[in-house]
Amino acid sequence: MMGVEESLDLRKDRFWWYLLVLGIGLHILVSFTSDLGLDAHVHAAYVTTEQASGENHLDWGHTRPFDSDASDPEYGADIEDRYAAWHTVFRISFAMFGTSEVALHIGAMIISALLLLAVWFTTSDLYGKRSALIIRAMVSIHPTFLFAAGRVNPEELMLLTMIGYAYGMIMLTRREWIRGIPLIIISTMIGVS
């Protein structure tokens, strides 16, 4: 029978698999027990307002009450395409799962899964499967990403974008143009929006 010391041995893959399973479980837990963050509410309002009226500004005006015109709907700033990638995630979540908080939490869980897959794929290609397991386990339990998944904040999407860009650059240095150029283009488009 395996002892506690053996299961907590960092040199064994079993420890890292346990940690990965714990991280995935924590992502699921925070997704269904956390309230949406203020930013998620504001972005959801932008998306639903744009879907209803075609205008990309809030009905109640500017979100930062720094002057007397802040609550005037005519004063609401048009954000244009500033958050296009994040709003696309919201639109897809609403289209697939209905316009609700649960839809946004499911969308955040999908982003989390894509992030862990990207970490696995890129790290295993660059450093081997064991390194990929360790780094994926560490990312899965990182407090920033757990918080972001629970509050539906864009940090995981930002890391996913950075991974795509960095991996694309590495592919270019290896002269693997077919893999590198599309990753850089897509990551840049997401990162700029």
Image: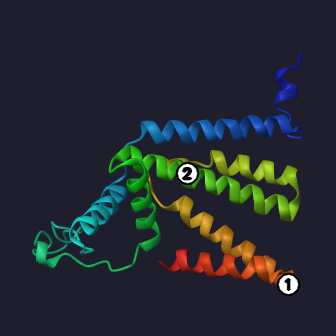
Query: Which quadrant of the figure has residue 124?
Result: bottom right
On the image, the x and y values in percent for residue 104 come to 41, 51
Decide if residue 144 is in sight here: no
Applied colour scheme: rainbow
120 sits to left or right of 84: right
Q: Name the secondary structure under disc 2.
A: helix
Q: Say above or below: 34 vs 73.
A: above
Q: Residue at point 38% right, 54% down?
A: 94
Residue type at tag 2: Ile
Q: Position of residue 142 (x, y in %)?
A: 62, 49
Q: Does residue 79 appear to the left or right of 102 in the view shown?
A: left
Q: Which residue has dot 1 on it?
A: 175
- Residue shown at the point (26%, 79%) measured from the top left: 78
Distance Cα–Cα, label 1 vs label 2: 31 Å
In percent of width and height, residue 160 lies at 62, 64
Q: Is residue 26 visible?
A: yes
- Name which residue type carries label 1: Arg
| Residue under numbered circle 2 | 110
Which quarter of the picture shows residue 7? top right
Instruction: Please provide percent x and percent y for residue 121.
Output: 77, 59
Q: Residue at x 37, y 57 (%)?
A: 40
The residue at 77%/38% (across/down) is: 17
Left or right of 32: which side holds 7? right
Vertical order, 132 against 187 (above or below) = above
Outermost top residue: 1
Q: Is residue 23 above or below residue 171?
A: above
Badge 2, how many Cα within 10 Å: few under 14, some, many 20+?
some
Question: In this orientation, which residue lies closer to the viewer: 20 or 9?
Answer: 20
